[in-house]
Image: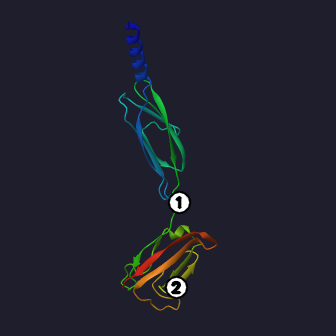
Amino acid sequence: MKRLITYLFFALFVNAALAQITYTVIKRDVTCNHQDLGDAEVNVISANPPYSYLWNTSDTTNSINNLNEGNYSVLITDGLGNDTTVNIQILLRICEMAPEIVFTPNNDGINDSWSIQNYQYFPESKVMVFNRLGQMVFQQSGLYQGWDGKDLFGIPVPDASYYYIVYHDKKDDGTIIKGSVTILK
């Protein structure tokens, strides 16, 4: 019986000494076209302080900033000498065009043209807008300049919902965004 108790004590001691370091990871990826760089932070939950950190960037804090896309790792060591390596991948988010759903071309200087966010990253785009009957009322190829709510002949279109097709690249039919935009005056 004494041998069993000694073994159990030894097993518990070894398990405690080999206890894994538990942690949480918070990361922020690089925004499209590197508008904002990424960040990574590791927070230890285990109960054996103090903790030391050694990133593959040579940083020694629990967080690092201004990261380009890529793979990063940090070696965490606790007060008992236990360590673990955490791998974090910072990604580059893909830019997406984001057409607004409403605009008001009433010449008041506010929201007078149809806005498409991130259009500047797609200099070879193609934008087409159709009325409810399927007739094209607006078309533009190349860097998007905005639609002012007028048809192909320069006549203001009535208040209504219009349907758009936006190609990221006018030569690639596979990258398409479809939706509707409403004109209110």
Q: Residues within 10 Å of mark 1 (few under 14, many from 20)?
A: few
Of badges 1 and 2, the one in the foreground is: 2
Q: Is residue 146 visible?
A: no
Q: Earlier in the sequence, mark 1 or mark 2?
A: 1
Residue in the foreground of this view, choosing between 11 and 41: 11
Indicate left or right for 170 with 63 as reference.
right
Q: How many marks?
A: 2
Mark 1 in CB contact with mark 2 (< 8 angstroms): no
Q: Residue at x 40, y 79 (%)?
A: 103
Image position, residue 91 (x, y; %): 52, 51
Residue farthest to the right, as pictured: 171
Q: Disc 1 versus disc 2: distance between alpha carbons?
A: 31 Å
Residue farthest to the front, as pictured: 1
Q: Image quarter for residue 40?
A: top left
Image quadrant occupied by the N terminus? top left
Q: Where is 31 relative to 1, above or below?
A: below
Q: Residue at x 41, y 80 (%)?
A: 182
Residue at mark 1: 94
Q: Residue at x 50, y 91 (%)?
A: 154
Image quadrant occupied by the C terminus? bottom left
- Identify residue type, mark 1: Ile
Image position, residue 93 (x, y; %): 51, 57
Q: Residue at x 35, y 29 (%)?
A: 47
- Identify residue type, mark 2: Gly
Callout 1: SS: loop
Residue at mark 2: 134
Image position, residue 42 (x, y; %): 42, 40
Q: Is residue 38 visible?
A: yes
Residue in the foreground of this view, choosing between 80 and 33: 80
Q: Where is 169 relative to 106, above or below?
A: above
